[in-house]
Amino acid sequence: MSFESIMIAPCGINCGTCIAHLRNKKKCCGCKPESGFKVNHCAACRIKNCEFLIKSASGFCFDCEWFPCLRLKQIDKRYLTKYKTGLIQNLVKIKEIGITEYIKNEIIRWTCPNCGSIISVHRDNCLSCDLDLTTFKTLVSQT
C-alpha cells in the first residue's frame, strides 16, 4: 500500500515513505484513509483538515486558491531542509503529470538501490540493509 494514490497526502508528502508507516509496530495508515491508526500529528493535521482543501476537486493543496499557503510553505521548508524533499515541488509535479505517473516516479525515487526495500523520507539509511542513502536521496531529489 506504500505506493498508491491514497498514500499521497494533500500537502505532497508520500505517507508510504514516512517512518511512522514503515515501522513494524503501530503502523500509521497515512492521513487520507478514513480508518486505521494515525499518529497524533497526522490525525490533527491542519493542512489535511483545512476548510479550503475540502472544497478542492483533487483533494490536493495545488487546487486551492491560496496555494501555496503559509502552512504549506512552513512544512515545505522543513522537509526541504531536513529531508531534501520539496512538498510544493511534489504537488506541482502531481498537477503536471498526474497521480498515476507521479506514483511510478515515487516507486523509483523511494526504492533502495541495494535491497529493493522502501526508503523512509525521514532516514538517511535504508531501514532494511542500512545502506547510506544520503548521496542517493540528494541525486534523486534533483530529478
Image (cartoon, grey):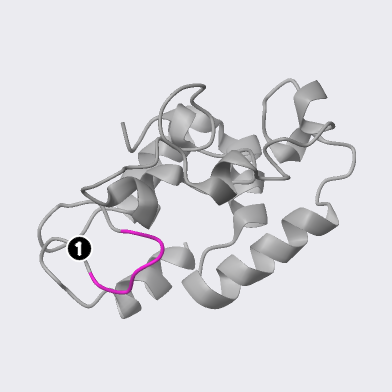
**Residue 104: percent from the left, percent from the top?**
37, 38
- Which residue appears at 31% of the width and 72% of the height? 136
**Residue 42: percent from the left, percent from the top?**
56, 45
**Residue 94: percent from the left, percent from the top?**
59, 39
Magenta stretch, residue numbers:
120-125
Answer above or below: position of 125 versus 39: below
**Residue 31 or 82: which is nearer the viewer?**
31
Main SS category, magenta section:
loop
Image check: 95 left or right of 134?
right
Q: Quadrant of residue 81?
A: bottom right
**Residue 15 or 94: which is nearer the viewer?**
15
Q: Quadrant of residue 79?
A: bottom right
Does the magenta-highlighted stretch encompass residue 141? Answer: no
Which kind of residue does numbered mark 1 sit on?
A: Leu
Does the magenta-highlighted stretch encompass residue 122? Answer: yes
Image check: 101 left or right of 117?
right
**Residue on which disc 1 sits:** 127
Q: Quadrant of residue 37?
A: top left
Split into 4 quadrants, where in the image is the N terminus? top left
